[in-house]
């Protein structure tokens, strides 16, 4: 089965179609996929290589993982861990893409969250920038931030744990 082709309209990319394409490729044995059509170029790589690192790009490009075109919100990937003690139930917030991690919306702004903060679903935790798109990662659970594992402006990989949330603290 051929992967669906993302639809474009007046220079805009249908991100839902790209997300479907990424999901399809994630389930397949394909490690790299590239689509070039007129002024559109989409490259998806399971190994995290970035097309920007290997060559200059002059056409609009979709980033290698599902994202939002505006700073609305890319879903953070969550994984439950075994409790480290009887009262802790840790959930890892993982990066949904390769990019650069930012704790605040601007260099002079307060961070979205700090260790010890209580968070609820929908609360913005951080930004992962990928190819000039700022993608806000929202919390999907209620709990307390127990660890921030990445420094501001540090590159991150797909699936890398960024923040740990204790959901046991919310009970």
Image (spheres, rainbow, N blue to C red):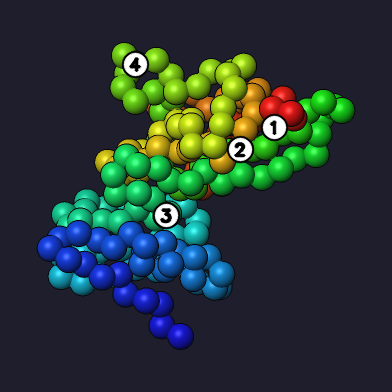
Q: CA distance from mark 3 to mark 2?
A: 20 Å
Identify the element where label 3 is drawn: loop
Tell which circle, 3 or 4, labels the residue nearer the N-terminal end: 3
Q: CA distance from mark 2 to mark 1?
A: 7 Å
Residue on which the image places disc 2: 141
Identify the element where label 4 is drawn: loop
Q: Are marks 3 and 4 in contact (CB under 8 Å)?
A: no
x 43%, y 19%: residue: 111
Tell which circle, 2 or 1, labels the residue nearer the N-terminal end: 2
Tell which circle, 2 or 4, labels the residue nearer the N-terminal end: 4
* Camera-nearest residue between 89 and 103: 89
Q: Are marks 1 and 4 in contact (CB under 8 Å)?
A: no
Eyeballing the image, is 16 above or below 164? below
- For the residue carrying disc 3, how many other residues have a C-alpha within 10 Å: few (<14), some (14-19), or many (20+)? many
> Of all residues shown, which one is farthest toward the bottom?
1
* x and y, in percent, of residue 32 in the image: 44, 66
Residue on which the image places disc 1: 167
Identify the element where label 2 is drawn: loop
* x and y, in percent, of residue 164 in the image: 63, 31
Residue on which the image places disc 4: 109
Q: Are marks 3 and 1 in contact (CB under 8 Å)?
A: no
Tell us which disc is closer to us: 2 or 4. 2
């Amino acid at each position: 089965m051929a992967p669906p082709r993302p639809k474009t309209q007046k220079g805009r990319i249908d991100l839902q179609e790209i997300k479907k394409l990424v999901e399809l490729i994630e389930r397949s044995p394909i490690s790299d996929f590239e689509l070039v059509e007129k002024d559109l170029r989409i490259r998806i790589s399971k190994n995290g290589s970035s097309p920007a690192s290997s060559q200059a790009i002059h056409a609009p490009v979709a980033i290698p993982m599902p994202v939002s075109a505006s700073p609305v919100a890319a879903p953070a990937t969550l994984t439950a861990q075994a409790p480290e003690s009887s009262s802790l139930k840790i959930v890892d917030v993982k990066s949904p893409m390769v990019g650069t991690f930012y704790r605040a919306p601007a260099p002079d702004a307060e961070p979205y969250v700090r260790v010890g903060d209580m968070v609820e679903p929908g609360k913005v935790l951080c930004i992962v920038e990928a190819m000039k798109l700022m993608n806000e990662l929202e919390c999907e659970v209620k709990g307390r931030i127990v660890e921030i594992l990445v420094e501001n402006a540090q590159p991150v990989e797909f699936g890398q744990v960024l923040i740990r949330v204790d959901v046991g603290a919310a009970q």
